[in-house]
Amino acid sequence: MPRIRTKILKSAFSKALEKFLLSESRNIESGTSERNLCARLAMHMEAEATSSNITGYYADVEYNRKQEGRVKTILDENMEEVAITCDLILHSRGESVLEDNLIAIEMKRSTHSTEATDSDRRRLRAMTKSSFDDVWSADGIAHPEHVCGYRIGYLLVLNIPQRTVAVEEYAGGEFVGISSMSF
């Protein structure tokens, strides 16, 4: 099976985000929980993935399981194991070992503390790293011990008074750039 092109993933995410912002602007403005907003975005993500021929993938909110039903973990900046629950992910639920993890999304309001938002940034850097131990080979047979290998990560920072969302992109364990959209 050929690898899904990053350009297609970015396009599917962008289209899903545009549709989400258009259809959910009142929901966003009313202060609805991030969990609800992520669930609404997940519906658009899964639909856009399917229409982009990204088949066999699921958009899951606060999914916290990995192989054999164990809790997902990452290694933090001190290389200590930490349980992880990302706001929204697009993945194969372990069905495609070679390319299981595609997109990780965290969402915050601009009114959250810098510490809380920075925690999401660290999580996205960890989740988009190709490996934690520089041993996992993405050989299509074995899953990594810790969550990693997401092709792209996005941090969505909702600024309700300004009716904008800042979109930070992460890949390869690094911050890539930032853009902004209105809703």
Image (cartoon, rainbow, N blue to C red):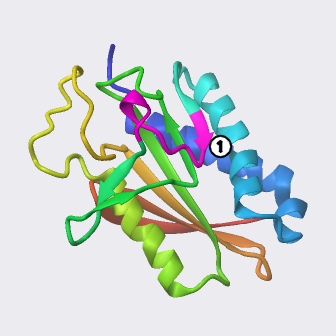
| Number of marks drawn | 1
Q: Nearer the viewer, residue 113 or 103?
A: 113
At x 54% / y 20%, what residue is drawn?
A: 53
Q: Quadrant of residue 167?
A: bottom right
At x 9% / y 41%, what residue is drawn?
A: 135
- Quadrant in the picture for the N terminus: top left
Q: Quadrant of residue 170?
A: bottom left
Residue at the left extreme of this rendering: 135
Type of residue at label 1? Lys
Magenta region: which residues? Answer: 59-70
Asked if residue 180 lies left or right of residue 29, the reply is left
At x 74% / y 56%, what residue is drawn?
A: 37
Picture coordinates of residue 154, whole percent (x, y): 49, 57
Question: Secondary structure under badge 1?
Answer: helix
Q: Is residue 161 above or below residue 158?
A: below
Picture coordinates of residue 8, whole percent (x, y): 48, 34
Asked if residue 182 lies left or right of residue 5, the reply is right
Asked if residue 57 lies left or right of residue 30, the reply is left
Label 1: few (<14), some (14–19) or many (≥20) C-alpha neighbours in 10 Å: some
At x 68% / y 30%, what residue is drawn?
A: 47
Picture coordinates of residue 117, whole percent (x, y): 51, 76
- Quadrant in the picture for the C terminus: bottom right
User: Is residue 63 magenta-colored?
Assistant: yes
Question: Which residue does the numbered mark 1 point to in the structure image?
Answer: 15
